Amino acid sequence: MGQKKISIREIAKLSGVSVATVSRVINNNGRFSEETRQRVLNVIHEQGYETNAIAKGLRMQKTNTIGIVVPDLNNSFFSDLVEKIESQFFTAGYSTIICDTARDAHKESIYLKMLESKLVDGIVVISGLSEFDSKQLSRRIPIVCIDRKPNAKDIFFIGSNHYKGAKLATEELIKSGTNPVILMGSRESTSSRDRLKGFKDTLIENGLNFDSGSIFQLTNQQDETIDGRRTAIRQLLRNKMMSGISPLGIFAVSDTLAADILFAAHSLYVSIPNDLKVIGFDDSPIARYCYPELTTIHQDTDTIAQDASTYLISAIQGDKVHTDSVKLVDVSLVKRNTV
Amino acid sequence: MGQKKISIREIAKLSGVSVATVSRVINNNGRFSEETRQRVLNVIHEQGYETNAIAKGLRMQKTNTIGIVVPDLNNSFFSDLVEKIESQFFTAGYSTIICDTARDAHKESIYLKMLESKLVDGIVVISGLSEFDSKQLSRRIPIVCIDRKPNAKDIFFIGSNHYKGAKLATEELIKSGTNPVILMGSRESTSSRDRLKGFKDTLIENGLNFDSGSIFQLTNQQDETIDGRRTAIRQLLRNKMMSGISPLGIFAVSDTLAADILFAAHSLYVSIPNDLKVIGFDDSPIARYCYPELTTIHQDTDTIAQDASTYLISAIQGDKVHTDSVKLVDVSLVKRNTV
DNA sequence: TTGAAAGCGCTAACAT
DNA sequence: ATGTTAGCGCTTTCAA
């Protein structure tokens, strides 16, 4: 299938020069007369010639391609990040191979091999369940980890200041007169651990108790479906309400979880923010579609994407990168209507 | 940067055979003794050798890679589709290059060139503003268009039956006692035109008037931000309500738009579904986070992804594909709480 | 069963 | 200013 694409060789023949000259013209390096330049460019244009990136990549050992490894494109925080990162690299002349691992370690490792095999110039790793093991790669490819701790000290790490985010949320909940509870999903991650710690420390700093009642973690099974989550949350709400706690404050570790809380609350006729106050995390689009609109912690994905790609590009170009190998991006509290 | 990866050549040397033999062993084709097989495989394993996909691609003129061109990964309908398509291809041994065009025709054309240049074996084009112009490609690459009419008859087209979806929604709205209005975003597309037509035809079939009052289309400016949309919609709602129409029925051309309607309605204290009935389109995650949960038209992304990839793979393998070059996937009405 | 060698399309070092 | 040529790592005839 497909008529062969024309190669640099025919261009050379048609314009009566050597392949080397054509190559020079294309890449605008080396010397050639203005006249040949025109001639070659004309032929290229009229033949619709496009350079073969595979051949070039093989020859140069550089593909101008970077890989992005992401757990789940359906998660809007991730898709937002990916879109922004991609856009940065596009502008810088790189193309990107996006790999959705579906949170599957095996798939991830296959993808990593594939990226290496395709000679990508760099890799962006976003989140993930465990530490990122750089020994999976046999070549030494520049890597940046976002929200995922690498196991090697020479890999650049960047992510939101989840600890601070949790602190802001928790403080706000306390200020508004509640003794907050944290709601966590079933999945562990670098970031969720930081958030938990921020929550706990803030409780303690404010002279409140942190005990088994302060933390509510969904089981795998509960977390599997929307309905599972909502049922579990409704249960939680009922328990807390029945025991007379009011207002109740919940720090949800993600906006979707927070949205599920609001939903469960509606079905129980508890009034928000009077009887129940909730704060989410991410400031994802859904926060503005919740009813009432969700108070949440904003993650600065612009900066994360920006810094991650800037770093990676300089690492690829072999610049000595003087920055620290870890960067925490600031977060902020977005007040809307659930507190 | 990066120590060189080991090549087939060193493997050959280390196992005392020729490169040809190593290649045969790796690809398990041609003949070789069991003994050499073992020897070579051992060396490969202990050296952590991985084949260089770039070199292989150049030689074979086949990269086992397909490109996916998508307007916007942040749109959950698209990200859902992409994820499913990707998963299909992954299983079939293909890797995918995902290209987010940000709805920019120029970016799209650059991406198409890039994909061609990287010798992808096939391309999936998802949605987009205008017809897909296959003349952008100079090689003849197998292509499948999803929700995007191609300008050539030999390109496979697949998409939801948007016309039927609109019909279902409109009928439901009429049955529930309203004289429905359609709410459209500012962007034109193959699918939105079909939906509009379905809406219009259904109105007429039911003896209702279709006039300028039946259709409310957001301007570019209004459609730019959430707040712009909500303000415009609030205006619409107020007008309709003031003129005494109740209940009012709105068919929103997407779930997000429907969600914005619900929001505007809340701020106006109109009661759903008593005074206002709305149906969305897509059955995207947000439909279950709206309050009340959104009645909507379900698109069967599983089937779309499945069929699109199956088709493309056989086209790549050069099978004569006997199916029609266009396939409409069935849709269904999901009744929830806004009608 | 195995090896030698050509060649995929390109760039770069070396000639001229 | 331009041409010749080697070689990136691989597969695949053709020979042995």
Image (spheres, coloured by chain):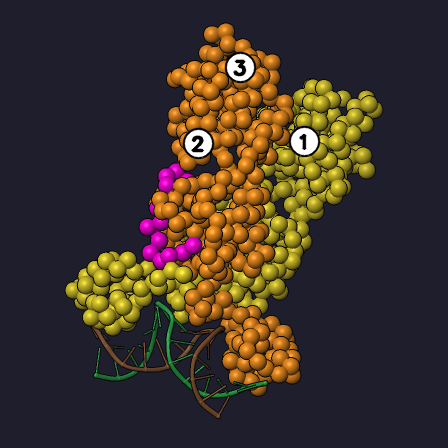
Chain colours: A orange, B yellow, C brown, D green
- In the image, residue B181 lies at what x, y percent? 74, 32
Mark 1 in CB contact with mark 3 (< 8 angstroms): no
Determine crowd level at label 1: few under 14, some 14-19, many 20+ residues with C-alpha closer than 10 A: many
Q: Which residues are magenta?
A: A128-142
Q: In the rendered view, does B199 fall on the left or right side of A244? A: right
Please tell me whether mark 1 or mark 3 is closer to you in this view: 3
Q: In the rendered view, does B110 fall on the left or right side of B60? A: right
Q: Amino acid at mark 1?
A: Asp
**Residue on which the image places disc 2:** A194
The residue lying at 52 percent from left, 84 percent from top is A18
Q: CA distance from mark 1 to mark 3?
A: 31 Å
> Is residue A314 found inside the magenta-colored segment of the image?
no
Residue A212 against residue A123 in the figure, above or below: above
The residue furthest right is B243
Q: CA distance from mark 2 to mark 3?
A: 22 Å
**Secondary element at image label 1:** helix
The residue lying at 50 percent from left, 9 percent from top is A245
Give me the disc on residue B212: none
Q: Main secondary structure of the magenta part?
A: loop
**Residue on which the image places disc 1:** B260
**Secondary element at image label 3:** loop
**Secondary element at image label 2:** helix
- In the image, residue B305 lies at what x, y percent? 50, 46
The residue furthest left is B35
The residue lying at 28 percent from left, 63 percent from top is B26
Q: Quadrant of the C terminus of chain A?
A: top right
Give me the disc on residue A178: 3
The residue lying at 82 percent from left, 23 percent from top is B242
Given residues B298 and B28, the one toward you in this image is B28
Q: Amino acid at mark 2?
A: Asp
Given residues A185 and B289, the one toward you in this image is A185
Q: Amino acid at mark 3?
A: Thr
